[in-house]
Image (cartoon, coloured by chain):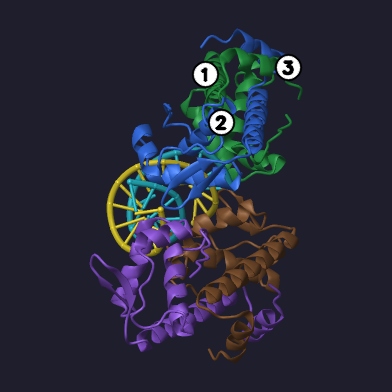
Chain colours: A blue, B green, C brown, D purple, E yellow, F cyan
Amino acid sequence: MKWKLDKSRGICAQLCAQICARIAAGILKPGDKLLSVRELAVEAGVNPNTVQHAFTQLEQQGVLYSVPGTGWFVCEDTKTALQVRRELVAEKVTAFFSDMADLGMLPGEIKEIVKEWKL
Amino acid sequence: MKWKLDKSRGICAQLCAQICARIAAGILKPGDKLLSVRELAVEAGVNPNTVQHAFTQLEQQGVLYSVPGTGWFVCEDTKTALQVRRELVAEKVTAFFSDMADLGMLPGEIKEIVKEWKL
Amino acid sequence: MKWKLDKSRGICAQLCAQICARIAAGILKPGDKLLSVRELAVEAGVNPNTVQHAFTQLEQQGVLYSVPGTGWFVCEDTKTALQVRRELVAEKVTAFFSDMADLGMLPGEIKEIVKEWKL
Amino acid sequence: MKWKLDKSRGICAQLCAQICARIAAGILKPGDKLLSVRELAVEAGVNPNTVQHAFTQLEQQGVLYSVPGTGWFVCEDTKTALQVRRELVAEKVTAFFSDMADLGMLPGEIKEIVKEWKL
DNA sequence: GTGGTCTAGACCACT
DNA sequence: GTGGTCTAGACCACC
């Protein structure tokens, strides 16, 4: 369970995204206990409040649940996590196409650029 | 000169991007006068301060220049505008790949999704 | 628009409750602008973060919406606000009956106590 | 001696309340020995530390006393238990009225709702 | 000025 | 130790 966070890009959102991704990949299974808020904060080099915020957000979306004094756990129903992830993907892709359109790129050109992109 | 601005997505950035795109496309040529801050603000249904901010930003990047009391104009040297646009594109694409990586998608999968994306 | 907050009783929840109550009472109408986060924080003698948290919570419930850089507004659809308020009422009443049951009071006794209660 | 604890509602407080209620009802009499911390914890499906915490709290209020190595007992003086219970009742009722007031309900409306409430 | 996000650190109840 | 809440104060983009 390794966390790679880019501090210049919305930490809370990255946490939520990566947790959903881990659930989708089966790395986190229903009922699994996550690292504690403080542990994860240390491991990720981030403020505990930010982790708490991310967990609470995923709780409201039905991905995680908390047992006060005990920890945070993955909900039994994995479907909502997959759904949340799907929505995030769609959100990011449409925002990307919009940003590129602002820069004067047509859909075909955008797809070509992405296709040829070397990381 | 028609402006399409999505109010939920960072107006200032959209303005800068669209201006660079117009220069790159030859719609705006060196020496051309832009709409006044007020006119553009009205036409785009946006706060004049935001337009002012965008113009100033492009001025600092060497894309536009202002003649006090007269208006804003496209710089003679179009190369910097093209360069600014290229950087913005690269910025957006890398951020996009990072966001998708957070969601657990490999480069190949990302390219596939973009390729098949229907707007 | 006067705010009375008891600092020993969950400030965030009180804010949410009172906002819903104001909407239900017609004091806040659809489209109305609320006090800014900072203003309300000062007026209520509370930390701006707490106000922000309350507003964000009501946003997720479809009661308020924000226009970045401008302020917070009451959603057009007042029905959800009424629904949220109704749920909060039910929540509080059932919790109250549970608490009283723990203290050994039967429903009839509880109702009698409430009926005779002098504030 | 059967314990009904709702895990989502402050276990420690429920224990204290229910013990006071049993004393008030005469189910627990002065000098009676309670279940051991461990036994009660098992029977209620709760952490032993939580039970310990509740007993200690009631000890400080003069409701219970402990004989080290032997167990916990009901104090001879039942009056303090009754008093503690009375205070808890008053506390809960006033908190309830405050919560409902936040939601914009007048005392009369609150009483009406409680009166008509069906469990 | 506005909201949005993050850090830092405190206190509480509960396990 | 755990989560939950609140305070305090900072920085950013945008109006």
The residue singled out by tag 3 in the image is B116
Q: Nearer the viewer, mark 2 or mark 3?
A: 2
The residue type indicated by label 2 comes to Ile
Closer to the chain start, of discs 3 and 1, is: 1
Counting from the top left corner in percent of width and height, residue B106 is at 56, 16
The secondary element bearing badge 1 is classed as helix
Q: Report if the CB atoms under discs 2 and 1 are less than 8 Å apart.
A: no
Residues under labels 2 and 3: Cα distance? 25 Å
Q: How would you rate the neighbour count of disc 2 (Cα within 10 Å): few for under 14, some for 14-19, many for 20 or more?
A: many
Please, which chain is the residue tagged with disc 2 on?
A
The residue singled out by tag 1 in the image is B87
Q: Report if the CB atoms under discs 3 and 1 are less than 8 Å apart.
A: no
Counting from the top left corner in percent of width and height, residue C88 is at 63, 66
Please, which chain is the residue tagged with disc 1 on?
B
The secondary element bearing badge 3 is classed as helix
Counting from the top left corner in percent of width and height, residue C117 is at 56, 89
Residue A23: numbered disc: 2
Residue at 67% in and 18% down: B114
Evaluate whether label 3 is on the same chain as label 1: yes
Counting from the top left corner in percent of width and height, residue F5 is at 45, 59
The residue type indicated by label 3 comes to Glu
Above or below — where is B34 with respect to A60? above
Name the side, left or right, on which D21 lies relative to B109.
left
Instruction: Report if residue C74 is visible in the image.
Output: yes
| Quarter the C terminus of chain D occupies | bottom right
